Amino acid sequence: MKNVDKGFSLIEVLVALLLTTVGVLGMVALQGRSVQYSQDSVQRNVAVDLATELVEIIRANPSETFNNAAPQFPMNNGLKSSSIFYKAKASDFSNPADCVASATVVPRTAAEQRNCWASKAKALLPGGSTVFLSDSYICRSSSAGNCNGQGSMIEIRLAWQVREGTCLDAADTSNSSTICTYTVRVQP
């Protein structure tokens, strides 16, 4: 009689268990990275919405941004070298005040709209007012990252705080930054 073994050997079972374990560990690592990317996406979407909102506030108040603003003049002419909307890095807006908006009060002046926007930005972006003051800026710029008070573009940079190694900014090649940024340049 011939003895024919049927079934798996112990080595085959161990190899199958090893492959399954590697696959499960890969899925766990992928899940952790997915959560990190989702968190970054949410924070960037908030920054994009805030920047867009500020651009619309700036466009709604051309006399605060342009030397000669329509409708008094045929067209907007030249960005002002200083504006209530400009904010240098490591500083706050000039004459900031609390937001006046409530269920019954709507901000009417450009300064009130700016102050409400700043309060919203400080509340929505992680790191609050500390990071808003130290790393965010709004300026007139002639080239990206150059707040020289010249040119026809307004550059808005919003910043927020994250855990070390979780910022997905392309400029953070060492992956050690705890501050993420979103920058947009617009022509109002």
Image (cartoon, rainbow, N blue to C red):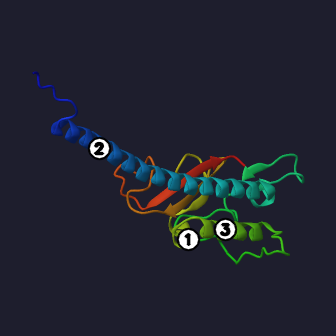
> Which is more N-terminal, label 2 or label 1?
2
Which one is in front in this view, the residue at disc 2 or the one at disc 3? 2
* Amino acid type of the residue tagged 1 in the rendering: Gly
Q: Separation of disc 3 and disc 1 at Cα?
A: 10 Å
Q: Secondary structure at mark 1?
A: helix
* Amino acid type of the residue tagged 3 in the rendering: Lys
Nearest the viewer among 139 and 149 is 139
Q: Where's residue 154, x and y in %? A: 64, 52
Q: Where's residue 187, x and y in %? A: 69, 46
Residue 50 vertical position relative to residue 5 in the rendered view, above or below: below
Determine which residue is flagged by label 1.
128
Task: Answer left or right for 129 relative to 104.
Answer: left
Which quadrant holds residue 125?
Answer: bottom right
**In which quadrant will I find the N terminus?**
top left
Determine which residue is flagged by label 3.
120
Residue count near mark 3 (Cα–Cα under 10 Å), binned few <14, some 14–19, many ≥20 = some
